[in-house]
Amino acid sequence: MAVFRAVRAHAGMVATMLEAFNTEFDTWTPPLDVLERRLAAMLDREDVVVLVSGDPDSPLGFALITLRPTAYHDGPSAVLDELYVAPAVRDRGHGTELVRAMFDALGVRGCGEIHINVDEDDLDARRFYESHGFRNHEPGTDERMLCYIQEL
C-alpha cells in the first residue's frame, strides 16, 4: 500500500476527505473551500504532517498530525488530529499503514510522544488505536486520562 506526504497541491483532496469524514460522523465541518484554504496554509508548515494512503488520483485515507514543542522531550510532541479511511476500503490495512507511516515520520523528527482524542463510545476507533499501542492511562498506572476542551 502506498502512503505519501501531502503538499499544498493536495489541499483540495485532503479537504474533500476531511469533509467526508465529518459528514459520515455527523460532525460540524467548515465549508469545503474554507477547509481547502486552511489545509493549503497548513501544508506549507514544517510542524504539520499530512499522510495520504493511496495515490493523488485515488486517495483512500489520510492522517493529519500537528507538532508542538514540549519541555518533556528533546523533540516535539505530536497530536494526531484526524485519521480517516474511506468506508469502502476499511479493514484492508490502510489505517494501519497510515499509523506505521506516521510513526516513521515522527521518529525522523525526534518526537517524544503522540496524543490522540477518541470519543468514548467509538469502540472501533478505540480498539484500532489500542491495537497500535495507544493507551488512555498514564504509563505505570491504571488511572484513565481525560481530555478537556473549551472552545474560544
Image: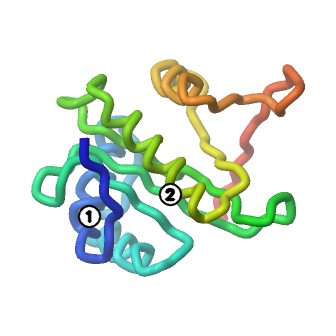
Image-based side of 66 in relation to 51, left or right:
right
- Residue type of the residue flagged with mark 1: Leu
Res 147 → quadrant:
top right
Residues 63 and 152: in front is: 63
- Colour scheme: rainbow
Q: Which mark is residue 139?
A: none
What kind of element bears circle 1?
helix
- x, y (%) of residue 103? 54, 48
Residues 37 and 112: in front is: 112
Image quadrant in which the C terminus is located? bottom right
- Residue type of the residue flagged with mark 2: Ala
Q: Is residue 93 above or below residue 55?
A: above
Q: How many marks?
A: 2
Residue 20 visible in rendering: no
Image quadrant in which the N terminus is located? top left
Q: Residue at x 61, y 43 (%)?
A: 116
Circle nearer the N terminus (1, 2): 1
Q: Residue at x 17, y 60 (%)?
A: 56
Residue that carries the numbered disc 1 in the rendered image:
32
Residue 139 visible in rendering: yes
Which residue is outermost to the left? 57
Q: Which mark is residue 105?
A: 2
What kind of element bears circle 2?
helix
